[in-house]
């Protein structure tokens, strides 16, 4: 883990989709290693575009993203794979191989680290198995290792998703609406897991959220996007309702909050 | 208020029905198909059936070896074809292929395989390796590739691309994306199609026997040529039972996979 850093720098970065939609406009942003960042904005504001630009799932159409001083390659290939190796990603819909065991799902996080033929035959080296088990222990479900992914609850599936990311020994974790398909109780558990892992391991963590109260509660630094542009960048402690109004371009309602307001 | 039912497109409905009726009338005329003649001559078919009844069960022991040969031909054809159809299907699936040129080439390759009939392949391989079961098995391999790759490439196109993207996101290669992202989602349909292809192959190996590709079809052809209709009836019965058994087994396997 000597190489772990995880500094991200966007410079004049832009994404225009083939259909003309602007997903990111002239973004300048610097993220320090180990930061925990929550990205907010209404749907279509470019939250996913930003995350997916970090690991090259969405290529930029202008400008650049750098990770630890190395530009993110803008096309598929060995260099991009080399970079993705150290970037974990967590998805709203978990994206697990439902028919496979939890352990195999976590080992998918090791794909880029093991020889190709071993992965194809699922002959995972012992060191990688150990890492996968450790990742499962860190999210608190080692006893589920041999269970089929499809038989887990939503919260447990998302924990497997987190374990898969951890198994990569990542410098950065990208979480794209990680709690959007979970109930409120599980939502808080998953958010606490993400915060704890960020503190314990110092992995730079970027989380997309659309609930304002969650952003306030768990974010340390909040980034607000609106129509692909950066409209807010500041501490979660000092963010005001006025700032949120500015980010959303409207008054926010109960729909924007996870918990009901008393 | 409940909205009024939208007006139907009567001209289109009438035109479609008229077109179908005209096509049917034209085709029936073309081949001299007439219901009245059919009803008058139906007794001729009855004669053939009465001559083939009852099936000659004393002939059954002599069917054992050719029948096993038919199964062997079908198994080899399904295994070889089943393996080779995997890359053919993957490269023909728009969401997984390696670029437009590869996709286009593979699609057309598949179309050629499908367009040429299995009898053609049997003749082709018979001239290459000689008449016999090996030629039959090779012809069925091609036939199996044609069947499975067409059906399975469509299943592959309908998978959820979220998981393959997740494999990409951890730094996985194209092959790993297939192995862990795409194939697990379509594994069940693959097994279904392979079993279906096996069923078709047992049936097809009867036809292939007609051109000397061995198996039960060859016996069928000799008995038919000697007007031994009671034996022909037995052979047809045996194949029917075999196909029904195979279907039962594959149904059981499929339901267990779900």
Image (tube, coloured by chain):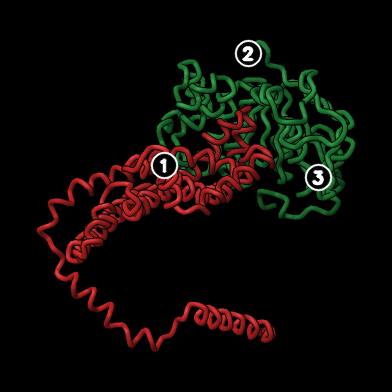
Chain colours: A green, B red
Q: Is residue B242 visible?
A: yes
Left of A43 or right of it: where is A82? Answer: left
Residues A262 and A43: in front is: A43
Please give the label number shown on residue B127: 1
Residue A50, position as x, y percentages in the image: 77, 37
Tag 3 residue: A17
* Gap in angstroms between the C-alphas marked 3 and 1: 56 Å
Query: Which residue of the protein is positioned furthest toward the left in this rendering?
Result: B58
Q: Chain of mark 3?
A: A
Q: Chain of mark 2?
A: A
Q: Quadrant of the N terminus of chain B?
A: bottom right
For the residue labelled by badge 3, is the local secondary structure a helix, a strand or a loop? loop
**Circles 2 and 1: CB atoms closer than 8 Å:** no
Residues A97 and A241: in front is: A97
Give the number of callouts. Answer: 3
Residue B86, position as x, y percentages in the image: 49, 40
Discs 3/2, front: 3
For the residue labelled by badge 1, is the local secondary structure a helix, a strand or a loop? helix
Q: Is residue A185 above or below residue B114?
A: above
Residues B48 and B8: in front is: B48
Q: Which residue does the image show at 56% across and 27% down from the upper left? A: A109
Q: Assess disc 3: are there few (<14), some (14-19) or many (≥20) residues with their C-alpha within 10 Å of its C-alpha.
A: some
């Amino acid at each position: 883990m000597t190489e772990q850093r995880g500094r991200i720098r966007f410079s004049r970065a832009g994404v225009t989709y083939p259909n003309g939609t602007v997903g990111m406009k002239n973004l300048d942003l610097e993220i320090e290693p180990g930061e925990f960042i929550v990205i907010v904005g209404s749907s279509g504001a470019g939250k996913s575009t930003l995350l997916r630009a970090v690991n090259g799932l969405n290529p930029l159409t202008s400008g650049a993203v750098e990770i630890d001083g190395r530009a993110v390659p803008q096309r598929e290939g060995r260099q991009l794979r080399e970079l993705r190796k150290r970037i974990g990603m967590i998805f709203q819909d978990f994206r697990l191989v439902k028919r496979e065991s939890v352990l195999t799902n976590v080992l998918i996080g090791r794909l880029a680290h093991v020889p190709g033929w071993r992965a194809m035959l699922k002959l995972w080296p012992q060191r990688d198995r150990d890492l996968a088990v450790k990742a499962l222990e860190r999210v608190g479900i080692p006893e589920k290792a041999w269970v089929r992914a499809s038989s887990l609850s939503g919260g447990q599936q998302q924990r497997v998703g987190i374990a898969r990311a951890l198994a990569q020994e990542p410098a950065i974790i990208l979480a794209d609406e990680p709690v959007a398909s979970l109930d409120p109780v599980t939502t808080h558990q998953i958010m606490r897991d993400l915060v704890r892992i960020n503190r314990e391991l110092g992995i730079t963590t970027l989380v997309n959220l659309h609930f304002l109260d969650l952003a306030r509660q768990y974010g340390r630094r909040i980034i607000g996007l609106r129509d692909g542009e950066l409209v807010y960048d500041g501490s979660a402690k000092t963010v005001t309702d006025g700032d949120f109004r500015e980010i959303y371009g409207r008054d926010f309602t109960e729909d924007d909050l996870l918990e009901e307001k008393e | 208020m409940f909205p009024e039912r939208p007006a139907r497109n009567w001209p289109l409905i009438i035109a479609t029905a008229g077109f179908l009726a005209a096509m049917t009338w034209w085709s029936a005329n073309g081949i001299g198909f007439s219901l009245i003649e059919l009803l008058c001559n139906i007794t001729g078919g009855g004669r053939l059936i009465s001559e083939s009844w009852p099936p000659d069960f004393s002939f059954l022991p002599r069917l054992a070896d050719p029948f096993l040969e038919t199964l062997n031909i079908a198994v080899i054809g399904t295994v070889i074809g089943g393996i080779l159809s995997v890359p053919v299907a993957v490269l023909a699936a728009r969401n997984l292929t390696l670029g437009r040129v590869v996709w286009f080439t593979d699609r057309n390759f598949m179309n050629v395989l499908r367009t040429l009939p299995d009898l053609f392949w049997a003749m082709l391989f018979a001239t290459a390796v000689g008449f016999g079961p090996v030629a039959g098995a090779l012809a069925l391999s091609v036939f199996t590739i044609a069947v499975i790759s067409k059906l399975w490439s469509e299943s592959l196109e309908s998978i959820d691309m979220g998981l393959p993207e997740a494999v990409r996101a951890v730094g996985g290669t194209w092959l790993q994306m297939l192995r862990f992202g795409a194939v697990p989602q379509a594994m069940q349909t693959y097994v279904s199609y392979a079993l279906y292809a096996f069923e078709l192959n047992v049936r097809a190996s009867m036809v292939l026997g007609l051109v000397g590709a061995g198996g039960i079809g060859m016996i069928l052809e000799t008995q038919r040529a000697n007007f031994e209709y009671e034996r022909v009836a037995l052979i047809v019965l045996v194949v029917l039972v075999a196909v029904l058994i195979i279907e039962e087994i594959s149904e059981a396997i499929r339901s267990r996979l779900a």
